[in-house]
Amino acid sequence: MTVIASDLEIQSLLRLDEGFIHSDIYTSPTVFEMEIEKIFHRGWVYVGHDSEIPNNGDYVLRWIGRQSVIMNRDNNGKVHLFMNRCRHRANSVCQFEKGNSSHFRCAYHGWTYSNSGDLIGLPFSEGAYSPELNKEEFALVPAPRIAIYRGFVWGSLSDHGPSLDDYLGLAAKRAIDLFCDHSPEGEITVRHGANKSTIYANWKFQGGDGYHPPFTHQAATMAIKAKRQGRINPLLVGATDGPLSRDLGNGHFCLDLRSINRAGLPDEPWAKEYRSAMVASYGVERANYIMNSGGPHTILMPNIQLLNPDLRVLRPIAADELEITFYVAFLKGVPKEVNVARLRDTESRMGPAGSINVDDVEMFERNQLGMRQMVNPWKYIGRGMAREHIDNDEIAPEAYRMENTMTAHYSDELTQRAQLRWWASQLSQP
Amino acid sequence: MLSRETVETFLFREARLADENRYDDWLSLWTEDVEYWVPANHDDYDPDEHVSIIYDNRERLQDRIARLNSGGAWAQEPQSRMRRNISNVEIEQAEGSEDVFVRSNVIIGELRRGRQTMYFAQQKHRLRWTEAGLRMAAKTILFVNNNEPMHNLSFIV
């Protein structure tokens, strides 16, 4: 295995102009440590959605890289991210995945913090500290930066770097907008449970690959859908004016399926009621666009994917292990049946027993195994390099338009190249 | 009321067919109506308000079996080798119906691609006599680790 001795050598792992990348990118523990340091413990990492903590005092326990963080809402309704660590001797102060609490009390020596982080309990302190301990200097430590876009909460463990606004960029924000705007109120709730999968493969396997479905998902697409459609996947043939792969900048990318009708609503009274509510909120043209688009199929670096109707959060564990959590996003202001359909759709495809996910997991793990073969360690992601072109997304309404973005055919490996170009730039930072 | 021997014979046979990946034989153990439920995160909630690992009616269960039978279900190629042990069987007559509720504990040992995994769960069966014999109308599996990240459950649980 190549030992990565310096940041400069990262660039030697990619020959993107020829379409080749080195397997060490996915297998090297040294590379993985650099990713934790320079991506997960420095840049913006998605933590949770503020609808998970609707009431004052609510909290959830999450991860930023290897750091345990508490996302909570204080008694005044403000959202915080706190490092899960007592200021005294560093015990974790929060033990449960979620709950509601006015305070966090360290069980080791009883130091107690309010849900806005203030140290409010310091047992037997009289005469113990000279000079007297200033409680204000011993508050829970907040994550250096927190930023929220449409309820999606990101944290950064560095106090400098690009703003979340700049990091996401317009195209990625418009994908989030399209996701949320499936609700006539423009709001989602993310507190309806989650499926959690362990995958023995590298975290950079994030899908966004339009080439694999008819092969990897042969079983799901052919056996199950045989009753509904033919054998050949129509997305794999044809020119680059249909579904696209799209580079959204900063490593974010999407499979852009918005141009094909994916509404899939049944002829039921609740579906008509949903459509009416959407038309009332957005007008006919925009409502039709939102619903027919099927929502985004968008992957935001480093750890969140918006694949309507679910949103997925990744947690890197090791070079060859990750965890992925599939949350079903409910839409506000819709008939109950709409959200039940979103549950059934997600369950049938995603999670440890989902028809799509299990075969993705299998392919990622076979890939991880294959990449250990080092006689020729170069992988090829050159598909569609000659048909990349700038697209202005003129068919989309202005609210969802992804102007001036690089695109290629749906099945092209533009998405992998976009991710790795960004990845190399992050790891090449001092 | 069904005898313990009748109930246990059914449970052991169901376990063996699942262990041996006999998908169609296992499917034939169901009544026409199907409620096959593997909760996620915790053991008891309204499945129309909270996502599940599996929540199949007959149509979705048939899709699940069709996928396994398709020849392209890579996550079961090669197939899992399994053996499961069932114990702690408790039998209860359903109120206002001929159905019988059965609770049991199960340990599933799965070997696939060199990795051996143990699963611990409680099972709840709703059994019914039909013209074809004893069948299950509902099966719920409460995994001890249903709130932890799990590896593929691509076999029949």
Image: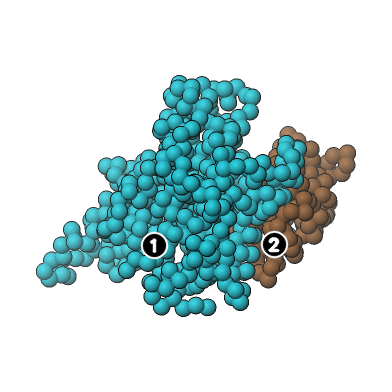
Chain colours: A cyan, B brown
User: Residue A125, image x and y in percent?
Assistant: 19, 65
Seen in the image, is B124 located left or right of residue A407? right
User: Residue A384, image x and y in percent?
Assistant: 56, 52
Q: Chain of mark 2?
A: B
Seen in the image, is A9 located left or right of residue A341? left
Q: Residue at x 83, y 50 (%)?
A: B25
Q: Amino acid at mark 2?
A: Ile
Q: Quadrant of residue B12?
A: bottom right
Residue B38 visible from this viewpoint? no
User: Residue A423, image x and y in percent?
Assistant: 43, 61
Q: Residue at x 69, y 58 (%)?
A: B75
| Relative to B115, residue B131 above or below | above
Q: Nearer the viewer, mark 2 or mark 1?
A: 1
Q: Residues within 10 Å of mark 2 (few under 14, many from 20)?
A: some
Q: Residue at x 78, y 51 (%)?
A: B69
Which secondary structure lies at badge 1?
helix
Q: Disc 1 designates what residue?
A: A425
Seen in the image, is A380 located left or right of residue B9? left
Seen in the image, is B30 located left or right of residue A21? right
Which secondary structure lies at badge 2?
strand
**Which circle marks residue B108 in the picture?**
2
Q: Quadrant of residue A225?
A: top right
Q: Chain of mark 1?
A: A
